[in-house]
Amino acid sequence: MKYHQINSALFVKNRKKFMAEMKPNSVAVFNSNDIYPISADSTLPFAQHRDIFYLSGVDQEESVLLLFPDAPYEHQREILFLRETNDHIAVWEGEKLTKERAFQVSGIRTVYWLQDFHKVLNEMMTYADTMYINTNEHYRATVETETREARFVKWWKERYPAHNVAKSNPILQRLRSVKESEEIDLIQHACDITEKGFRRLLGFVKPNVTEYEVEAELAHEFIRNRSKGFAYTPIIASGNNANVLHYIENNQQCKEGDLLLLDVAAEYANYSSDMTRTIPVSGRFTDRQKAVYNAVLRVKNEATKMLTPGTLWKQYHVEVGKIMTSELLGLGLLDKADVQNENPEWPAYKKYFMHGTSHHMGLDTHDYGLLHEPMKANMVFTVEPGIYIPAEKFGIRLEDNVVVQEKGEPFNLMRNIPVEADEIETLMNE
């Protein structure tokens, strides 16, 4: 791994929190992700399943975590199963976790090789009444591929039909959405790497540069700072491309007078940052561009203040919509008749701002969090309003990552990343 080792105390805490929520006499199992094939002997780069990483810190394929807080013997309460390593694997694939190294990473003392998994699980099932299975219930999930976790669940249900079944995901949705201080530090580090990439771009972007050249500059800066790279597929959208919300082709030339929308951010140690900035390709905003830019910035700043404990996500978006409506009226994009005659299911402002303002973030860019429950301190959210005007061939979105505080305004993890229009112009023209 490129990142510095995370103190295992974080994963010890995370396991304790999860096990405290388990039913009596129950077992929970978590699997690593597969390495996914492309064709021939090619595969996608390995990306660890965030749940097993959250609970163990293990960032390696073919790993399994078993938790059984009521096991008869102490050494059975936390068990890690790993692919057995040897000299041949070390030569061809690189060093894998030894049992001792796995303990250093995870804090788990009982480590078996993977070939012992079924035997050990069978013993645990003779003691247990309930199995926690891990299913993906994120509100944005659309999974068509059968995962390693899904294969295990199917196998387990056939092998142990007499046991009760419970779900890990509702517990993890609540636990993972409230960050430990160590996690906030890791997200902050990802944001700091993103800042370095953005500042690099401010001296690089000019008329006739291509979107993919911008992407390459960011990748260079992220990786040289121990990131694996982008936390998600980068959006580098010049001119009218910014009006395609998930534009990812990044293959056009940035033209004089255009705006360049950058939804780009680094990951660090599997934790995401999520930034959007919009900059003038020529180094100066036009009066109209700056007016729209400052309207989006005002909405972002006002929306940020509302991310406080007890706030309900749905009502928050209603209030942000009211602020955006006022700004769109001021810009002449809406008139009073548009608002008076609007469809309550699709308010007038949605013509220019059609997506949500905030989502949970952390180990996943769109992280776990139950949207029907009130916000809590130490949740991390994006704040990302935008105004998109195809008729004027530009779109503007601004996005920061903020931590909900017990008292006072949220703490902005991207407070050092330039966002004021005048500062961006100054830096681009130095």
Image (cartoon, rainbow, N blue to C red):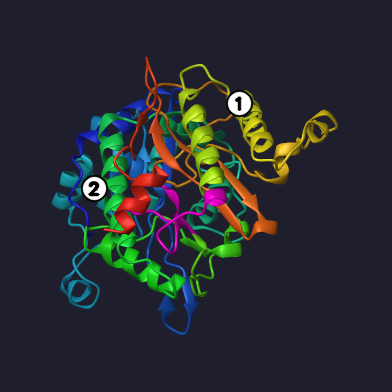
Give amino acid for label 2: Val
In the image, residue 269 lies in the stretch drawn in magenta: yes
Q: Name the residue under label 1.
A: 372
Observer-nearest of 95 and 280: 280
The quarter of the image holding the C terminus is bottom left
Observer-nearest of 24 and 389: 389
Residue at image coords 19%, 40%: 109
Tally of numbered discs: 2
Q: In this view, does 197 lie to the left or right of 40?
A: left
Q: Which is nearer the N-term, disc 2 or disc 1?
A: 2
Q: Is residue 274 left or right of residue 155?
A: left
Helix, strand or loop at mark 1: loop
In the image, residue 15 lies in the stretch drawn in magenta: no
Q: Residue 302: horizontal and vertical position, in percent?
A: 50, 27
Residue at image coords 32%, 51%: 426
Crowdedness of circle 1 by 10 Å Cα count: few (<14), some, many (20+)? Answer: few
Observer-nearest of 73 and 201: 201
Q: In this view, does 30 lie to the left or right of 226?
A: right
Q: Residue 353: horizontal and vertical position, in percent?
A: 65, 43
Q: Residue 135: horizontal and vertical position, in percent?
A: 54, 44
Question: Is residue 64 something that shows in the picture?
Answer: no
Identify the image quadrant of residue 318. Answer: top right
Residue at image coords 55%, 30%: 370
| Residue depth check, mark 2 versus mark 1: number of the one nearer the observer | 1
Give amino acid for label 1: His
Q: Quick check: 152 above or below 221?
A: above
Task: Kindly give the residue lying farthest to the right in the view shown.
Answer: 341
Q: Name the residue under label 2.
A: 111
Q: Distance between the residues labelled 2 and 1?
A: 39 Å
**Range drawn in magenta:** 260-289
